[in-house]
C-alpha cells in the first residue's frame, strides 16, 4: 500500500514539475475556489476563499478589491497546498481557466476603469428591459443577462452608457486582466446575449435589431464593438501575461506565457463537471442559487419567460431553468439549530448537524404535513418577485414537527425550479434520460437526490467527484484544450478520458414522494399571495 502511495505521489510530482497540470478557478456566489488537476484529471491540490455579496444602493455587488484579494488568497492557498504535500514550489501550470457566476454587468471605459459597481446575477432590476428585448427579439432575455442590464441602463438614461468601451461578465473581466484578451467561452457568452448555434457566435440579426433600437441615442459605439469575442471549448483564449502572472501569484513564483482556455460561467463548468454536455443529458446545480440544464435535440416550440436558452461550452443548445434562491434560508435554519445546541454546551460538527437534520426530513410526511415555506432571500423572476422575504407558515392543523419542518425547507429550496422544469418536461416534452446533481444540496448522502428526484420525477445521479463542483469543471475545460485529440469532441473527452469507470450513485423517484411534492406545489403556488404580502408590508 505504501509502495502504491509513493508511486502515485511520484507521478503527481512529475506532473507538477513537467507542467502536465491544469488549474481551474471559479468565482462562486459565496466562495472562490481553485483546483489543480494532474494528467489523470483528478484533483491534486486546492484552495478556497469565502466571500459574500453586498447590497449597496439597492444593488447586489462585489467590490473589485474583493475579486483580486480573493483570487490571490485562493491561489496562494492552493500553491501552499502543493508545497506542503509534494515539496515543490509551483512555478508553471499546463493550462488555466477562469469561471464565475454567469450573467451580470461589468462595464469599462477606454482606460479600463469600471464605470459602475459590478451588477451581479442576483439583481432583479431590469424587468422593463427584459420584457422589451424579449418582445423585439422573440427570444427570452432574462433579467440577469448582461444585455438586459445594458439596455436597462439606457432606459434609465444612465450617464455612464456613453462611455462604455467594453462590457463583460465577471469571468470575462478576470480573464481579460490576466491575459489581455477580450474573449468569452460560448456558454458564458450565451448569458450575455443570444447565441446563433449554427455559427457559434452572437446572433447577428439580434445585434442589428438592438443597434436599430438605440440608434436615436447616438452613442459612440455599436453593440458588436463593445462585446467580447466568442470562443468554443478547446480553443486557445490567450496566455498569462507577465502582469497577469504577478496579479495571480503575489509571490512572483508563477511564470508567464501559460496557456489559458476560454472563460466560462458556472453553468458551463457544472455541465462539464457532470459530463452533461451530450444531447438528452441534464444536470442541476444546487447551492446559493439553483439551476437545471437540459441539452436539447431541437429548439423549443414556444418562448417561455421561465426558461433561458444557453449553450454547452462546445456550443450545443441548452434549456436552462435558473432560480435566485436555493439553500441560503435552509443554511440559516441549520445555524439556528447550531446556536441552540451550543447554548446547552453541546458542540456538534456542522457537517454532522447538516446530515442529522437533512436525514430527519426523510421521516416527514410526503407533502410536508401541510407546512409552507419560501426561501426568498432575494427576488425570484419565475414567480414574479423583485424582492424576497424568507417565510415559514403553518395552520393550527398542520403537522408541525422537526421532520416536516426540515422537509418543507428542502422542498421549497426547489419550488421555483420545479415550476420552470414542469414547463420544460410537461409542456415542451423534453426528454431527460438522467439528471446529474452537484452542489451543496447534494453533499448529504441520499437526501438531496431523493428530494430532487421527487421534484422532477426522473432518476437523479451523483458522481463521486460531484463535490468538486465548478472549479474542477473549469480545470477539465483547461485540460481539454491541451490534451484533446484532433477533432475530439468535449463529450467524448469527458466520457472516455475523465469519467470512464467512475462510480455513480443513482436514485429513482419514489412515487409517494412525487405525489407529495405535487401536493406541496399546489400549496406553494396558492401561498405566493402570502409571500407577496410579506414583501409589501415587511420592510
Image (tube, rainbow, N blue to C red):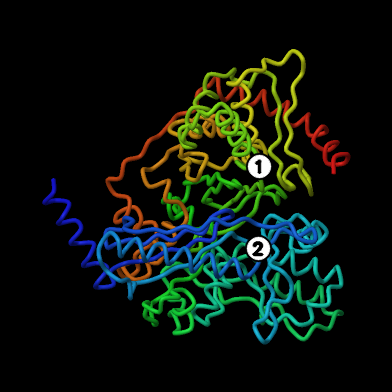
User: Upstream in the sequence, badge 1 or badge 2?
Assistant: 2
Q: Position of residue 463 (x, y in %)?
A: 38, 43
Residue behind mark 2: 62
- Residue visible at 48% across and 71% down? 262
Q: Height in image: 143 above or below 157?
A: above
* Helix, strand or loop at mark 1: helix
Camera sees residue 461: yes
Which residue appears farthest toward the top when viewing the image?
397
**Considering depth in this image, is 39 or 393 the residue closer to the camera?**
393
**Considering depth in this image, is 418 or 425 the residue closer to the camera?**
418
Camera sees residue 267: no
Quadrant housing residue 328: top right
**Considering depth in this image, is 153 or 193 the residue closer to the camera?**
153
- Dot 2 crowding, Cα within 10 Å, few <14, some 14–19, many 20+: some
**Considering depth in this image, is 261 or 10 the residue closer to the camera?**
10
Is label 1 or label 2 in front?
A: 2
Quadrant housing residue 413: top right
- Dot 1 crowding, Cα within 10 Å, few <14, some 14–19, many 20+: many
Q: Position of residue 381 (x, y in %)?
A: 74, 48
Mark linked to residue 420: 1
* Helix, strand or loop at mark 2: loop
Q: Position of residue 264 (x, y in %)?
A: 52, 64
- Residue visible at 59% across and 32% down? 410
- Residue visible at 63% across and 70% down? 64
Amino acid at each position: 500500500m505504501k509502495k502504491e502511495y509513493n508511486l502515485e505521489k511520484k507521478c503527481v510530482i512529475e506532473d507538477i514539475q513537467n507542467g502536465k497540470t491544469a488549474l481551474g478557478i471559479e468565482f462562486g456566489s459565496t466562495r472562490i475556489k481553485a483546483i489543480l488537476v494532474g494528467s489523470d484529471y483528478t484533483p491534486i491540490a486546492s484552495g478556497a476563499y469565502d466571500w459574500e455579496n453586498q447590497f449597496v444602493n439597492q444593488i447586489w455587488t462585489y467590490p473589485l478589491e474583493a475579486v483580486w484579494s480573493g483570487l490571490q488568497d485562493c491561489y496562494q492557498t492552493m500553491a501552499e497546498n502543493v508545497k506542503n504535500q509534494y515539496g515543490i514550489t509551483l512555478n508553471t501550470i499546463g493550462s488555466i481557466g477562469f469561471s464565475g457566476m454567469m450573467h451580470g454587468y461589468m462595464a469599462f471605459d477606454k482606460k479600463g476603469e469600471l464605470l459602475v459597481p459590478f451588477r451581479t446575477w442576483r439583481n432583479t432590476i431590469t424587468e422593463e428591459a427584459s420584457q422589451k428585448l424579449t418582445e423585439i427579439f422573440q427570444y427570452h432575455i432574462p433579467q440577469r443577462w448582461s444585455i438586459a442590464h445594458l439596455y436597462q441602463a439606457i432606459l434609465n438614461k444612465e450617464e455612464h452608457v456613453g462611455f462604455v468601451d467594453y462590457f463583460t461578465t465577471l469571468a470575462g473581466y478576470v480573464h481579460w486582466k490576466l491575459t489581455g484578451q477580450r474573449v468569452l467561452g460560448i456558454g458564458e457568452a450565451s448569458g450575455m446575449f443570444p447565441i446563433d448555434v449554427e455559427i457559434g457566435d452572437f446572433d447577428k440579426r439580434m445585434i442589428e435589431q438592438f443597434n436599430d433600437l438605440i440608434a436615436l441615442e447616438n452613442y459612440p459605439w455599436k453593440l458588436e464593438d463593445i462585446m467580447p469575442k466568442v470562443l468554443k471549448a478547446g480553443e486557445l483564449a490567450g496566455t498569462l501575461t507577465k502582469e497577469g502572472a504577478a496579479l495571480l501569484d503575489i509571490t512572483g513564483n508563477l511564470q508567464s506565457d501559460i496557456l489559458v482556455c476560454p472563460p466560462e460561467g458556472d453553468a458551463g463548468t457544472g455541465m462539464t463537471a457532470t459530463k452533461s454536455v451530450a444531447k438528452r443529458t441534464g444536470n442541476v446545480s444546487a447551492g446559493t442559487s439553483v439551476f437545471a440544464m437540459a441539452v436539447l435535440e431541437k429548439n423549443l416550440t414556444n418562448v417561455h419567460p421561465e426558461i433561458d436558452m444557453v449553450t454547452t461550452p462546445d456550443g450545443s443548445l441548452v434549456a436552462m431553468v435558473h432560480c435566485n434562491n436555493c439553500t441560503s434560508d435552509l443554511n440559516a435554519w441549520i445555524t439556528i439549530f447550531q446556536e441552540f445546541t451550543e447554548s446547552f454546551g453541546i458542540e456538534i460538527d456542522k457537517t454532522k448537524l447538516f446530515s442529522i437534520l437533512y436525514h430527519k426530513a426523510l421521516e416527514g410526511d410526503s407533502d410536508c404535513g401541510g407546512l409552507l415555506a419560501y426561501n426568498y432571500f432575494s427576488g425570484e423572476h419565475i414567480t414574479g418577485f423583485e424582492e424576497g422575504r424568507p417565510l415559514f407558515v403553518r395552520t393550527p392543523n398542520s403537522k408541525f414537527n422537526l421532520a416536516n419542518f426540515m422537509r418543507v425547507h428542502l422542498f421549497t429550496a426547489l419550488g421555483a425550479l420545479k415550476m420552470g422544469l414542469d414547463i420544460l418536461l410537461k409542456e415542451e416534452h423534453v426528454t431527460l434520460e438522467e439528471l446529474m446533481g452537484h452542489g451543496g444540496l447534494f453533499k448529504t448522502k441520499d437526501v438531496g437526490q431523493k428530494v430532487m428526484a421527487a421534484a422532477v420525477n426522473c432518476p437523479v445521479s451523483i458522481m463521486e467527484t460531484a463535490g468538486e463542483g465548478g472549479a474542477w469543471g473549469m480545470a477539465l475545460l483547461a485540460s481539454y484544450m491541451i490534451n484533446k485529440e484532433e477533432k475530439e469532441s468535449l463529450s467524448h473527452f469527458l466520457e472516455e478520458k475523465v469519467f470512464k469507470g467512475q462510480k455513480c450513485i443513482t436514485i429513482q423517484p419514489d412515487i409517494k414522494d412525487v405525489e407529495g411534492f405535487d401536493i406541496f406545489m399546489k400549496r406553494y403556488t396558492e401561498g405566493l399571495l402570502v409571500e407577496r404580502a410579506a414583501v409589501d408590508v415587511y420592510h
